[in-house]
Amino acid sequence: MTHRAQSSNIGLVLLLALTITSAGVVVAVGGTALGDVQEEASNDRAAHAMTLLDARTAVVGLGEGSVQTVRLGRSSDGRYTAEAESGWLRIRHTNYTGTSTEEVYNASLGSVSYRSGDTTIAYQGGGVWRHRNGGTTMVSPPEFHYRGTTLTLPVLRIRSDDAASGGATATIRRTEETTRIFPNETAAVGTGDGAPYDVDNPDGSTRQYRNPVRNGTVSVTVHSQFYQGWADYFRTRTTGSVTVDDGNRTATVVLETTRGIGQFDLPAKGESLSVRGIAKQHAVTDFQVNVKKGSGTFNNLDFSFYIQDGSKSWETLVEVPNGIGNSYCPSESPAVQFPVRIYYYDSSTPEGVHLWENETVSSNSGPVQLGCDGNDMIIEVDFTATSQTFTYKDGEFNEDTALDWEAYNDSATQAPSPTSFNHTGDDGENTTYQFGDTQNFRILTRHYFATFDSDFELTVSHGPGNRGTTQIDTSASGGELRYDAVAGGSYITYLHVTENNVSVALD
C-alpha cells in the first residue's frame, strides 16, 4: 500500500515536469517565430519606405521639386543611416584614340540604409537594394537606362551623413543644380566634371565630350555593398559585357561604341570612323559626306575613304580636277568633269583588284558633285545613290590613292573578270560581272561593305602626298553613316550623364 502511494506521487511529479518543460519549449519556439515574423514585417515596412524615399529623391534630385519628406515608420530594433561616402560610380571611355583612356566621371554615390540584424535595406544610385546573408536582391531599379544604343545615367548622390532610430522622418533637399557631365563642352583648360578629353585633335582643336561616342568602349563600374545586385541589373537591362570583382566589391558593364551610326564630324587625315556591329549582307542604308575647304585650295586634291581589314581592302577616291583653283565658286562657274573610282581587293582569292570607274562625273549636279558654300568649294558624295553609275574596268593603278592598288593587282594570279557578287537576295544579287558591265553607287557600296566583318575602321585620306593636311576644314565637314546593326550587340552611340546631389536629414 505504501509503495503504491509513492509510485502515484512520483508519476504526478513527472507529469508536472513534462508539462512545464513542454510549455517552456512552446513559449520559446513561439517567441522565436513571433520575433522572426516581427523582424520580417519590419524589414518589409522598411523596404516599402525606401521605395517611397526612392521616388521622392528622384523628384528632388531630377529638378521637379526642392524639398520632399518621407515618413520611414517605426522599427523595432533597426536603425536608419545616411552615408555620403557609401559606394562610388565610375565611367571610363577606354581606347578612344586607340590607346588612351579617359575617366569621364568618378564620384561617391552615398546611401540611405536601414539595418536590422543581418539584413540591410538601402537606397543607392536611384535604386533600392536588400542585402542578407551575403546576397543582394533588387527591390526597385536604379537610375540607369539603356535602350537601343543610348545610355542615360542621371547619377543621384546622397551628400549628407545622419542617423536615427525608432520612428524616423527623412527630409530630402537638393543641394545644388544639376551638373551636366556628358555631353558637355568646356574651355580648353577646364578640369573636373564635363572637362574636355586629355588629348587634342590632330587639327589642334580641343576634343570635347560630344555625342556620338567615338571609338573604344565605355564602361560603368559601381563599387558597393550591393554590387551583386548591380551586376544582376546590368545583365538583365543591357547587352553589355558584365563582370564582378568580389574582392573589391565592384560590378562593371562594358559597352562597345558605334560611332558609325548617325551623323559624324569628318575625321582628320589618317583618322577613322569606327564601324561597330554592322549586320551581315547589305546593311548600309545611308552614307554621305560633305568636305569643306579650309586654307589653300582644293585644286588637284584627291579625297578618299578606305578600309583595310584582314585580307580585304576597299577605297573610294574622288579626284578634284587640276586647274580648278579657287575660281570654281561662286556656283555660276561653268561645270567641269572629274573622275570617281572604287577599288576592292581580297588577297585570299586569286582575283586581282576590282576597279569601278566613272571619269565624267558632273561637278554641278547629281549625288557626287563639287558644291559651293559662298566662295568655298564643297566635295559632296552620296555613297548610297542609285543615280550615280560606274563601269567595271581592266585599268591601270597609278593614281595617288591611299592604298597601293598596283602592288595588290601585281600579286594576283588571275584577272577579276568575271567576278560574282554572292549576297543572294540583296539588291538583285546573285550577279556576275565582266569588264564593261555597269552598276550603281548604292549597290557597290553596300556589297563591298558587306564583305568585311562586323567591326572595322573607315579611314580618311587626302593628297597627293602630304597635301590636304590643312586644306580641309574638318570642323565644318561631316557626314552621315547609317546601317543595320547586329542583333543583341553590346553597343553604345549616345551617352547622357548628369550629376544630381541631394541631402537627406533623418529626424
Image: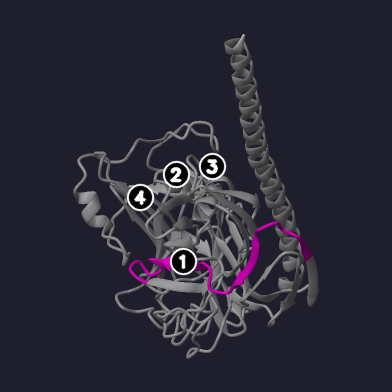
Is 461 situated left or right of 487 in this image? left
412 lies left or right of 481? left
Mark 2 vs mark 3: which is more N-terminal?
Answer: 2
Please name the residue that numbered disc 3 is placed on: 487
Question: Which segment is the magenta one?
Answer: 71-100
Q: Does any portion of residue 420 appear in the rendered image?
A: yes
Q: Earlier in the sequence, mark 2 or mark 4?
A: 4
Mark earlier in primary sequence (1, 4): 1
Earlier along the polypeptide chain: callout 3 or callout 1? Answer: 1
Amino acid at circle 3? Ala
Residue carrying label 1: 338
Q: CA distance from mark 1 to mark 4?
A: 21 Å
Q: Which residue is mark 4?
A: 344
Residue 232 rendering spot, x and y as whole percentages? 53, 47
Q: Nearer the viewer, residue 380 or 276?
A: 276
Secondary structure at numbered mark 4: strand
* Separation of residues labelled 2 and 3 (CA atoms): 16 Å
